[in-house]
Image (tube, rainbow, N blue to C red):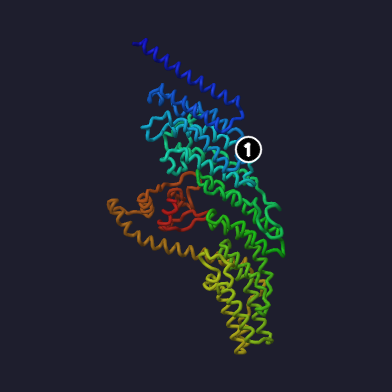
């Protein structure tokens, strides 16, 4: 019996070696006939399919599984055919995405050679999917990686070609994946676990599907590093912008980074780019300010808005407005300081005011900066003119009234040209002006000047003399508004904290009862509140463990200390009173 088993195995081995020999001769003949036509190539596939079917009949299903028949053996037999079909394929450099997709689909389509050997009752067609995956990983991915790693692919100049190829590869990967993998969206924790075999293996874990493999090996390992390197090396130059029109050119970062946006939302790639993007945007704004000097302010502002606007929704609004406040606002201040106020509305050059409204309407100029520029650079000159005009006695009251009405209409009413503003902005410029006490105070003072002149009340007109122009500018207005906003926020927070402390009275009593009648400190209340919200509350150790002699705690990751039953939290670089609810939200985020 044992001898019969040995003979059977020897016969099986001979049959297997015979198939391998015939397959080898098939490939050798194909190599000799280098200039083969499509029909002959199809003949090779049919012969290979017949040999694979013959080979599969020598092994049971269990033996095929242990040999990894469809994931290793079959792909190795089809490998030379795949290589011949890929010969001459030069993605990005020569072949466009459409042709590349046809070539890639043709290679994974070699799995049709498996169909005749795969059991008909195998509803999942696991052998076909295993062969598709192996051919894709072993023959297509390496070529795609080399093409994108090559210096011939420039992420700045050839962004469309690279993007089209990558998306074509994703489509082929999707078509080469079993249906349950196609529907899946990879998570950030996915990792590609390719075994030592050059053909990989059947995807035994969902994290190992082909789309994730492509994202890891092409996007994360090749494209993302090249984008990061190009961004790091980017420096604004004369080629960034058209000197005549101010139009940004294709080398602007948004032109070659944003097209990749749908594919950067993986493994924190986009957040890792944002720090560098903020720094580069600041450099671009500074360059534009230098490139368009005095007399070219409008082009400078327009180009600056175009440089920042594409990043809305990607960078947070505060970051973008901070960039504008640091670079654009000072230039606007100098620009507005040159405004010449004319007594005749028809002769008034409204371009400067329109530019201010346009920049604010873009959503980049903070509301506080906009109001400070109006208050500090525009309205002082306006008030000074109307007062000196009425004091000179050389005026017609109707002309002064028309002057007043023209300016009020300009600032308090929506512009006639609706293209001037972005209606996506939550608060429009004219709404801000109507609601601002200081702006309204200037116009009320102007109205009182007209009233005093109409009544010939020179004393009242004298009392309404505005401050000297040199005493007012947007810097002082901005400093005052910033302080007022901070004091108002602190007052609101203290009121909120006080209300919360009052509402915590019952909680303190309940907590005291829980402790057996003992007195509960406010620290106990805060600690219990943290525990109820599953947040750690522990004393800070080591450096910075105290603040003014009071113990600093960590509420989650947020440093806090308690003083007079008020919790102070570190926000930015300052300690601020905060409510427990806000503290929970901050710690949870």
- Asked whether 295 or 196 is in front, the reply is 196
- Asked whether 171 or 290 is in front, the reply is 171
Question: In the rendered image of this protein, does residue 408 appear above or below residue 101?
Answer: below
Give the residue furthest to the bottom: 455
Residue 550 visible in the picture: yes
Question: In the rendered image of this protein, does residue 511 appear above or below residue 188?
Answer: below
- Asked whether 166 or 366 is in front, the reply is 166
Q: Answer with the quarter of the image where residue 27 lies.
A: top right
Residue pictured at 58% horizontal, 65% vertical: 360
Q: Give percent across and percent down for residue 509.
A: 30, 57
Question: In the rendered image of this protein, does residue 356 appear above or below residue 539?
Answer: below
Question: Which quarter of the rendered picture does the N terminus lie within?
Answer: top left
Give the residue furthest to the front: 39
Q: Give percent across and percent down for residue 322.
A: 58, 58
Circle 1 residue: 150
Residue 196 visible in the picture: no
Residue pictured at 38% horizontal, 55% vertical: 522
Q: Give percent across and percent down for residue 415.
A: 58, 72
Figure disc tally: 1
Q: Give percent across and percent down for residue 337.
A: 67, 69
Residue pictured at 37% horizontal, 13% vertical: 5
């Amino acid at each position: 019996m044992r001898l019969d088993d040995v003979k059977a195995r020897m016969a099986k081995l001979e049959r297997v070696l015979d198939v391998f020999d015939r397959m080898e001769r098939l490939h050798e003949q194909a190599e000799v006939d280098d200039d083969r036509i499509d029909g002959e190539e199809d003949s090779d596939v049919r012969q290979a399919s017949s040999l694979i079917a013959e080979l599969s009949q020598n092994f049971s299903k269990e033996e095929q599984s242990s040999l990894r028949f469809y994931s290793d053996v079959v792909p190795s037999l089809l490998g030379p055919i795949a290589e011949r079909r890929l010969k001459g394929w030069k993605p990005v450099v020569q072949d466009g995405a459409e042709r590349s997709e046809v070539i890639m689909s043709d290679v994974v389509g070699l799995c049709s050679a498996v169909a005749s050997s795969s059991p008909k009752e195998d509803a999942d067609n696991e052998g076909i999917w295993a062969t598709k995956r192996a051919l894709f990983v072993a023959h297509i991915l390496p070529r795609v990686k080399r093409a994108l790693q090559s210096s011939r692919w420039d992420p700045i100049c050839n962004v469309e070609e690279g993007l089209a190829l990558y998306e074509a590869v994703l489509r082929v990967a999707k078509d080469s994946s079993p249906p349950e993998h196609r529907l899946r969206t990879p998570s950030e924790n996915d990792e590609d676990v390719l075994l030592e075999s050059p053909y990989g293996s059947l995807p035994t874990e969902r994290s190992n599907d082909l789309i994730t493999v492509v994202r890891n090996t092409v996007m994360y390992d090749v494209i993302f590093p090249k984008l990061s390197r190009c961004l790091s090396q980017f420096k604004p130059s004369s080629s960034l912008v058209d000197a005549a029109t101010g139009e940004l050119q294709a080398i602007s970062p948004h032109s070659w980074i944003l097209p990749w946006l749908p594919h950067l939302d993986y493994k924190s790639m986009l957040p890792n780019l944002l720090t560098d993007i903020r720094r580069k945007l600041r450099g671009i704004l500074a360059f534009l300010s230098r490139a368009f000097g005095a007399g070219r302010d409008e082009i400078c502002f327009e180009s600056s808005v175009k440089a920042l606007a594409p990043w809305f929704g990607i960078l947070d609004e505060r970051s973008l407005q901070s960039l504008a406040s640091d670079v654009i606002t000072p230039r606007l201040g100098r620009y507005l300081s040159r405004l010449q106020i004319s007594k005749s509305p028809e002769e008034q050059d409204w371009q400067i005011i329109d530019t201010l409204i346009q920049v604010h309407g873009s959503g980049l100029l903070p509301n506080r900066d906009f109001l400070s520029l109006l208050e500090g650079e525009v309205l002082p000159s306006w008030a000074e003119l109307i007062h000196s005009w009425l004091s000179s006695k050389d005026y017609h009251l109707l002309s002064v009234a028309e002057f007043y009405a023209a300016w009020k209409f300009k600032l308090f009413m929506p512009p006639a040209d609706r293209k001037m503003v972005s209606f996506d902005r939550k608060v429009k410029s004219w709404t801000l002006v109507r609601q601002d006490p200081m702006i309204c105070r200037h116009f009320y003072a102007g109205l009182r000047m007209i009233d005093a002149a109409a009544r010939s009340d020179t004393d009242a007109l004298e009392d309404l003399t505005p401050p000297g122009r040199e005493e007012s500018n947007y810097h002082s207005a901005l400093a005052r508004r910033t302080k007022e906003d901070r004091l108002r926020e602190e007052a609101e927070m203290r009121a909120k904290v006080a209300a919360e402390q009052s509402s915590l009275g019952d909680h303190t009593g309940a907590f005291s009862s829980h402790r057996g009648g003992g007195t509960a400190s406010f620290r106990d209340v805060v600690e219990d509140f943290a525990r109820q919200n599953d947040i750690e509350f522990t004393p800070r150790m080591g450096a910075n463990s105290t603040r003014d002699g009071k113990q600093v705690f960590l509420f989650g990751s947020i440093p806090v200390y308690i003083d007079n039953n008020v919790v102070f939290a570190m926000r930015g670089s300052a300690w601020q009173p905060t409510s427990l609810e806000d503290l929970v939200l901050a710690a949870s985020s």
